[in-house]
Image (cartoon, grey):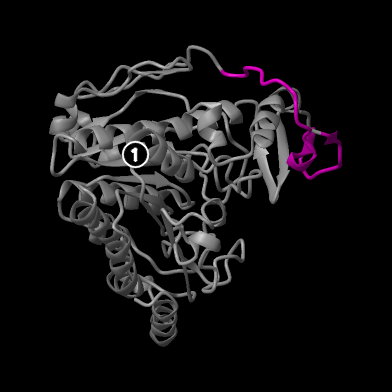
Amino acid sequence: MMFLVRNQVQQWKNHCRFSVNTMLSGHRFYKHLLSGRKCVSKNTKTSVSCSYSTEQNDTSPSIKQLSHARVIYAVAAALGHNKEAHPESSARVPAIVKALEKMELTPKFCGSDILELQNFNLASVDDIASVHAKAYVSGLEKAMDQASEQGLILIEGSGPTYATSTTFHESLVAAGAGLALVDSVVAASKNQLDPPTAFALIRPPGHHAIPKGPMEFCVFGNVAIAARHAQRVHGLKRVFIIDFDVHHGNGTNDAFLDDPDIFFLSTHQDGSYPGTGKFDEIGIGAGEGATLNLPLPGGSGDTAMRTVFDEVIVPCAQRFKPDIILVSAGYDGHVLDPLASLQFTTGTYYMLASNIKQLAKDLCGGRCVFFLEGGYNLDSLSYSVADSFRAFLGEPSLAAEFDDPAILYEEPSTRVKQAIQRVKHIHSL
């Protein structure tokens, strides 16, 4: 396989574009993984020794660790995958980690209640290929040489996604973190009625990445790959995916269009990028009815999302009877986020985290894993994720210390009600 690379004059110097659609089959994979990468943690309690490995070995936390934990998380900050002045930057995950430390929501402060999983395997090519075309995976791997030479390249999939020399490796790390958290939650659920809720603090994000290639800010479909892993490795046949990112998760949507065993539910701002996720996109063939898209009008906020949860998400999940719940957790619906115009608050995200955790407890033995997607105002992102952790712990929200009600305006309640009624009619809720 190969990429056709063509040099063009761009607004950035020494960049090139390459097309994922021009890769030819038959070329052998070659390894382009950074070796022996280590990270150092300041945490001294309930943390696992830290390294990323390409070898398959048992890196799971112990049953004892899992039995005491109420929250388990993994960090994959992808510091090398970065483009200057780009909203999806390498500053995002460190901002969250800093907020968790500041608000004393790490193992250092919470002891065994919070477990940071620091030793996990990278996702394998086979893991990625459970969702994405092997031609895309091998082509991206091969393109890392070009990225090493040019510094930054633009991948031409469905809209250019940037890549650096570390993008392939760091995308495998991100996906691997999600798989490891699924493994840990499933292991814990075998011995506990209330296993820990997990959160993959990872990037690049994934819900726009389509089966044939990347899209927008997304490289590999992290939550989709985890869904297939849950089915294939753990026998969890029925997977319920909730995507509350402000943008439609078109990649996840497309990956499971005809699959009746994976229910994809997306709430997103109507008319926002990428323009997909219409009411009538409900799946095809055997998967018809297992996709629900609810575009919300701009200005929708906390009241709208609470109603959506009660009237749409809960009855859908109850009817579907999932074995595990996975969440594409995008925090770009926050009123302070620069890329959209919903009016979610930190309190909205606390509510979602708390209610989804309870929904998982009620329906699927508490098995639930969150995956970071969007969120581009570093303050609202980090505070909202931290408040999600507080929700997982059952602690009161501190949203009032961050949210400013004075900046909110009246929600379009009539249009929200019409949207909810329409989706309820389509799906017989």
Q: Report which quarter residue 257 is drawn in.
A: bottom right
Give amino acid for label 1: Gly
Numbered range of the magenta stretch: 4-33
Q: Is residue 325 left or right of residue 80?
A: left
304 is within the stretch colored magenta: no
Quarter the N terminus occupies: top right
57 with respect to 355 (left or right): right
Q: Position of residue 285 (x, y in %)?
A: 55, 62
Q: Residues within 10 Å of mark 1 (few under 14, many from 20)?
A: few
Vertical arrangement, residue 59 with respect to residue 85, above or below: above
The structure residue drawn at horizontal position 33% and vertical position 43%, both measured from the top left corner, is: 236
In the image, taking residue 395 as reference, residue 303 lies left or right, namely right
Give how far across and how far down residue 135 sits, in percent.
69, 34
The residue drawn where x is 36% and y is 30% is 180
Q: Residue at x 31, y 36 (%)?
A: 73
Work out which residue is located at the far bottom of the displayed protein and give it: 414
Residue positioned 20% across, 34% down in the render: 188
Question: Which residue was labeled with disc 1?
Answer: 235
Front position in the image: 51 or 407: 51
Relative to residue 211, is residue 2 depicted above or below?
Answer: above
Magenta stretch: dominant SS? loop
Determine the image quadrant of residue 142.
top right
